[in-house]
Amino acid sequence: MEPDEAFARVRSLIKQHHAFFRECIPLIASENVVSPAVREALICDFAHRYAEGWPGERVYAGCQFIDEVELLCIELAKRLFRAEFVDVRPVSGVVANLAVYTAFTMPGDTMMALSIP
């Protein structure tokens, strides 16, 4: 298969995938159904930019809009959780999960999970 044909096939499969999930609900707990606004945010350029450090003190240049979004998220989270300090920067999905586990469990607690086939 030529690269152009492969690209067209992948695009077609992506469209079929989206059409399929418009008609059904995934029942896998770790999957999510997102709104068009969330989908737009996930595919924007922010998704693959480095923004290490704090707003206004980034390691890399060109983060002024990321800074504004992060500051808005921080303020909203502070209000929502009535917190004085909020950090909205998960390092990774694993680290984000660990943060939740340590926030809501104590040493010796029992957790339930499904086995992975």
Image: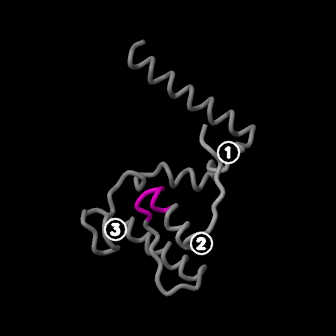
Q: Residues within 10 Å of mark 1 (few under 14, many from 20)?
A: few
Determine which of the numbered discs, if any, sits on residue 57 in the image.
Answer: none
| The one of 22 and 116 positioned closer to us in this rendering | 116
* Tag 1: amino acid: Ile
Determine which of the numbered discs, if any, sits on residue 104 in the image.
Answer: 2
Q: Which residues are magenta?
A: 90-96
Check contact, mark 2 vs mark 1: CB within 8 A.
Answer: no
Please state the horizontal and vertical placement of residue 73, each as a whole percent of the image. 50, 72
Q: Residue at x 51, y 55 (%)?
A: 41
Judging by the rendered image, the residue that carries numbered circle 3 is 64
| The one of 82 and 57 positioned closer to us in this rendering | 82
SS under mark 1: loop
Q: Up-down: is 15 above or below 41?
A: above
* Tag 3: amino acid: Gln
Identify the mark nearer the N-term, 2 or 1: 1
Name the colour scheme: one colour
Judging by the rendered image, the residue that carries numbered circle 1 is 28
Check contact, mark 1 vs mark 3: CB within 8 A.
Answer: no
- Circle 1 or circle 3, nearest the eye: 1
Please state the horizontal and vertical placement of residue 9, each as a whole percent of the image. 51, 21
